Image (spheres, rainbow, N blue to C red):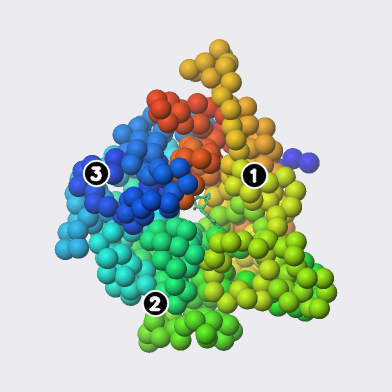
Amino acid sequence: MSTTFPKDFLWGTATASYQVEGAINEDGRTPSIWDTFCAKPGTIIDGSSGEFADDHYHRFAEDIAIMGDLGVKAYRLSIAWPRIIPHPDGAVNQRGIDHYVRVLDALREADITPVVTLYHWDLPQYLEDRGGWANRETALRFGDYVGAVASALGDRVGIWTTLNEPWCSAYLGYGSGVHAPGVRDYAKALDAVHHLNLAHGLGVQAIRSNLGESAHTSVVLNLSVNIAASDHPEDQAAKHRADLIANEVFLGPMLEGRYDPEIFEATAAVSDWSCIKDGDLATIRQPIDTLGLNFYSTTHVRAKSNYGMQPTTDVATSAERNPMPAQEIVDVLPPEGELTAMGWNQEPEGLTTLLTEMGRRFPDVALMVSENGSAWDDEVSRDPNQPGGQIVHDPKRVTYLDAHIKAMAAAMANGIHVTGYFAWSLLDNFEWALGYSKRFGIIRVDYASQRRIWKDSALRFKQIISTNTV
Ligand code: PNW
């Protein structure tokens, strides 16, 4: 069965500043928490950093030309906060602004709509020195930063996104400490959750006060698609707990103006949530146009107690600390089937479920698949017919791409309003704690030469876009 998409469907590719730009000392940029984190031994698997990455800071024109060849309608990129406000005095760095003006103008020239994320994890280090996301001040400074960007870049931007995956910022950054700033403190992780929510609300307000009500606003969440092992009430309770702490802590405040009281009960041993001040929830709940969802895989859970049955010895007993608090009753089952190079399962039906649930619950908000993709151990082949004489045959990425676009189409066939799909990623890039060891690009990057090499998945994506059909 084939599906044709709406005429104005936004096919795009996504990247993030620290993962692709490099040029960390250029035009007045100061360090972010990721520069600091990468410099600590043992944090990044290959000892690398975003110092050079894809050199996209200098090669954006070439990369936009590739996007033109792919035929994408939109490019989801992020702005590096420490390029815009490099110092604690709050002064705006015009050279930082000028860089993004050049990028956005080149996109307009290529007829590609910019979808701009304001925070994709590169927090200025000077803010972390004062407590980072565990400190309320960071949310207030985010509001100032967004106001500066909105007034400077204004109508060059098609869709504004406040935050990318606050789950990762809060729980990987302050819970497990696997991401920058590498803190392991559940109380701080929950403070970070609230301050990220507050930052989102202040960010939307800053966009609208600078650009008016017609500005298109969004946030991007990586909701966990938790699947209970059975209908047993204890397995269902485990799923419910995982949903609460992973998903509801963001969805409730941002879209409904409330924290589910069960969140406070479940986390009482960790936090009294005194970080929540009068009026915060009204600030956080701002009308937004689009909810961006990043989807990669699903999570199967069951009750830790196993309700008196076999002991759960086959269950993943990760030596790593759980990123989230209050998961004592939750066992995460080992992923099944063919796993990607990230060790993540492939369950495209999870994307149909996610979109359908969110679309039904929030019918006034459009949905966008703001990231989807997979990492594989790619190899380069010779092909004299390709520019540069090389290509990557990546059949598994092609299969993953097709299956997930079909899964999205299945939700749309259910009447769910989905406006776009963004492949993660345009380019192989700096995969955070995994450095350059995992490749998500539909275009390969040869890190020695910075040469871009097409993969079969890019050719397939180009075909899907040009036919607008899968
Ligand atoms: C997302 N996890 O990150 C990000 O938005 C991208 O920057 C990233 O490159 C992409 O997915 C692929 O990983 C995540 O460990 C990173 O649960 C890690 C996790 C989830 C999302």
Residue at 58% over, 21% down? 381
Residue at 41% over, 83% down? 276
Quarter of image, res 365: bottom right
Determine whether 295 is above or below 113 in the image.
below
Mark before the other along the chain sequence, 3 or 2: 3
Residue under circle 3? Answer: 25
Q: How many marks?
A: 3
Q: Position of residue 313 (x, y in %)?
A: 75, 65
Determine whether 181 is above or below 386 in the image.
below
Residue situated in front as seen by the camera: 286 or 318: 318
Residue farthest right in this picture: 309
**In which quadrant of the rendered image does the N terminus lie?**
top right
Q: Is any part of residue 201 visible from this angle?
A: no
Question: In the shown orientation, is residue 325 left or right of residue 335?
Answer: left
Residue under circle 2? Answer: 283
Question: In the shown orientation, is residue 339 left or right of residue 268?
Answer: right
Residue situated in front as seen by the camera: 325 or 308: 308
CA neighbours of label 1 inside 10 A, class few (<14), some (14 to 19), many (20+): some
Whether tag 1 and tag 3 are in contact, CB under 8 A, the answer is no
Residue under circle 1? Answer: 340
The amino acid beneath tag 3 is Asn
Single out the mark in the foreground, 3 or 2: 3
The amino acid beneath tag 1 is Thr
Report the Cα–Cα distance between label 2 and label 1.
Answer: 40 Å
The reply to whether the residue tagged 3 has its Cβ within 8 angstroms of ligand 1 is no
Report the Cα–Cα distance between label 1 and label 3.
Answer: 34 Å
